[in-house]
């Protein structure tokens, strides 16, 4: 069976896996972004807390994904729970780091000016600081999403959802006629998804980065 | 507003980038927000080795290992769990994992760094954006898929696993090297050429020493990445600690799973710690951000 025949005959399964893969990564990334930006906002003013947040999230990233999933399984069991937890944890680092860098990089004179025209602390944050810090945060989200695509594939070994299942099915049937097709379908599917997400982020950047600070 | 945004830019490195910015537009665009990242994490430490840096991480790792060992001694092992740990299997897997990591890192460095130097020479410079684009796609490739494809192609065994680990890490290290060599202030290179140094002399005496921190960062990236990818080597028949984790998952034996995971985490953290120490110790004196002049005076 050629690759295209394989894809043709299994397209329902493949589409379901692709949808689940994209869904898992997207939802975890939304959660990671919300938590990550919140951590950034809470810690960037303090040298100590900001660096602690960056170091802590960097340490998580050092941990190999299979090992983190392995440590989560005794706590959460197999399936969706360890996958989601691991994806959110790994997604945090680039977002937290870039949020802190971005927020610290905002020109203090702009914040002063905002205070001067009578903006409250909250208004300053949402109307001045966060919009100015948004480009690096968005880059963090892009980097994190690419990473999560690959980690989600590994999470399939712990019965997680997504295209990783195709790859592991191929590995467990090594030598059979369909092994290559399965691995190829899973791998190419993930690459395509990653590139689509990347394109979407470029578009989001165009739409959401304030005109004044566009490069 | 626009003026203000631009006005913020000329702070140190941005001047250098201003020049790079105009040539390869697209390829450089994703870097800026990433670049300031590491330095921002750094002010807390890397310049000097404080006792906290030396003690905290190894102490935590040792405590975790000790706790795991104590727990493990008390855990009940049935025959299946004992089987996967019998005959010094744990030590064997640990040794395999370390050697996979070290060997693959070695190959990553001898491939990526010379290639990075080549890609920043004038003749090959046009190829650099292509390689960067390739590196981007490479990052989108899942490590496990790449490994599985190599195993199907080359047959099961250490060789396929090793090649997979190397291929996966070469691109990020290469991208780092190219970005770093490019970020070297062109006026320094010009000055070196101006006092009559040859192209090879400039590379050896100016560019490479200036790029040392970056190359060390590449070593660290490669090591950390490879410890992680080496856990997947098991799926390609390459052994390593992934064996314990995978058999723990498939057989539903938590002691095996936890032991494998904890050992892997400990190894990854220790490797990163050692590499971070190396980054501080091997950095050329004059590059100390505290002030090049002062450091040089102290050195002389």
Image (cartoon, coloured by chain):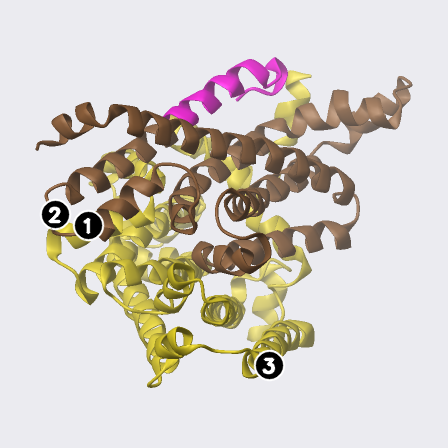
Chain colours: A brown, B yellow
Estimate how packed mark 3 is, as few (under 14), some (14 to 19) or many (20 or more) residues with alpha carbons within 10 Å.
few
**Do the residues under discs 2 and 1 have CB atoms within 8 angstroms?**
yes
Residue B228 picture quarter = bottom left
Viewed as shown, does residue B41 lie left or right of B245? Answer: right
Residue B114 picture quarter = bottom left
Q: Which residue is mark 3?
A: B66
Q: Which one is in front, A162 or B58?
A: A162
User: What residue occupies the far left of the structure in this picture?
Assistant: A1
Q: Which residue is mark 2?
A: A176
Q: Disc 3 vs disc 2: which is toward the camera?
A: 2
The residue stretch that appears in magenta: A195-215
Residue B197 in view here? no
Q: Chain of mark 1?
A: A
Number of numbered tags placed on the structure image: 3
User: What residue occupies the far front of the structure in this picture?
Assistant: B78
**Secondary structure beneath label 1:** loop
Viewed as shown, does residue B234 lie left or right of A207? Answer: left
In the picture, the disc for residue A198 is: none
Residue B67: image x %, image y %?
Answer: 62, 78
Q: Quadrant of the C terminus of chain B?
A: bottom right
**Secondary structure beneath label 3:** helix
Q: Which residue is mark 1?
A: A173
Residue sitting at x 55%, y 84%: B73
């Amino acid at each position: 069976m050629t690759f295209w025949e394989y894809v043709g005959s299994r397209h329902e399964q493949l589409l379901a896996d692709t949808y689940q893969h994209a869904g898992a990564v997207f939802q975890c990334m939304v959660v990671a972004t919300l938590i990550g930006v919140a951590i950034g906002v809470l810690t960037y003013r303090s040298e100590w807390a900001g660096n602690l947040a960056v170091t802590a999230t960097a340490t998580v990233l050092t941990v190999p994904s299979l090992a983190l999933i392995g440590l989560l399984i005794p706590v959460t069991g197999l399936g969706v729970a360890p996958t989601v937890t691991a994806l959110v944890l790994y997604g945090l680092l680039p977002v937290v780091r870039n949020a802190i860098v971005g927020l610290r990089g905002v020109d203090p004179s702009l914040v002063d000016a905002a205070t001067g025209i009578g903006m409250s602390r909250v208004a300053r944050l949402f109307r001045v600081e966060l919009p100015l810090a948004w480009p690096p945060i968005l880059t963090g989200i892009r980097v994190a999403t690419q990473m999560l695509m690959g980690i989600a594939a590994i999470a399939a070994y712990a019965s997680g959802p997504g295209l990783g299942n195709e790859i592991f099915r191929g590995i467990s049937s090594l030598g059979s006629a369909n092994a290559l097709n399965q691995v190829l379908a899973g791998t190419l599917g993930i690459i395509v998804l990653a590139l689509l997400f990347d394109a979407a982020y470029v578009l989001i950047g165009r739409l959401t980065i304030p005109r004044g600070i566009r490069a | 507003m626009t003026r203000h945004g631009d006005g913020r830019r000329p702070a140190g490195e941005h001047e250098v980038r201003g020049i790079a910015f105009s040539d390869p537009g697209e390829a450089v665009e994703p870097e800026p927000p990433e670049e300031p990242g590491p330095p921002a994490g750094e002010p807390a430490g890397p310049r000097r080795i404080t006792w906290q840096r030396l003690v905290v991480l190894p102490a935590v790792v040792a405590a975790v290992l000790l706790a795991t060992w104590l727990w493990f001694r008390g855990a009940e092992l049935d025959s299946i769990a004992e089987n996967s740990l019998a005959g010094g299997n744990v030590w064997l897997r640990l040794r395999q994992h370390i050697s996979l990591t070290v060997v693959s890192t070695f190959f990553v460095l001898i491939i990526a760094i010379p290639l990075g130097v080549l890609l920043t020479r004038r003749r090959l410079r046009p190829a650099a954006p292509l390689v960067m684009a390739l590196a981007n796609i490479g990052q989108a490739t899942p490590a496990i898929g790449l490994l599985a494809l190599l195993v199907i192609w080359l047959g099961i065994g250490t060789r396929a696993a090793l090649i997979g680990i190397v291929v996966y890490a070469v691109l990020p290290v290469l991208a780092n090297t190219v970005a770093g060599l490019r970020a070297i202030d062109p006026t320094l290179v010009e000055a070196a050429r101006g006092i009559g140094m040859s192209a090879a002399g400039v590379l050896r005496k100016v560019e490479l020493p200036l790029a040392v921190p970056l190359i060390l960062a590449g070593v660290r990236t490669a090591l950390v990445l490879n410890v992680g990818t080496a856990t997947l080597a098991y799926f390609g028949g390459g052994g390593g600690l992934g064996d314990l984790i995978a058999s723990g998952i498939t057989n539903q034996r938590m002691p095996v799973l936890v032991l494998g995971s904890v050992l892997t985490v400990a190894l990854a953290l220790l490797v990163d710690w050692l590499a971070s120490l190396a980054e501080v110790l091997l950095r050329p004196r004059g590059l100390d951000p505290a002030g090049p002049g002062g450091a040089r005076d102290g050195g002389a």
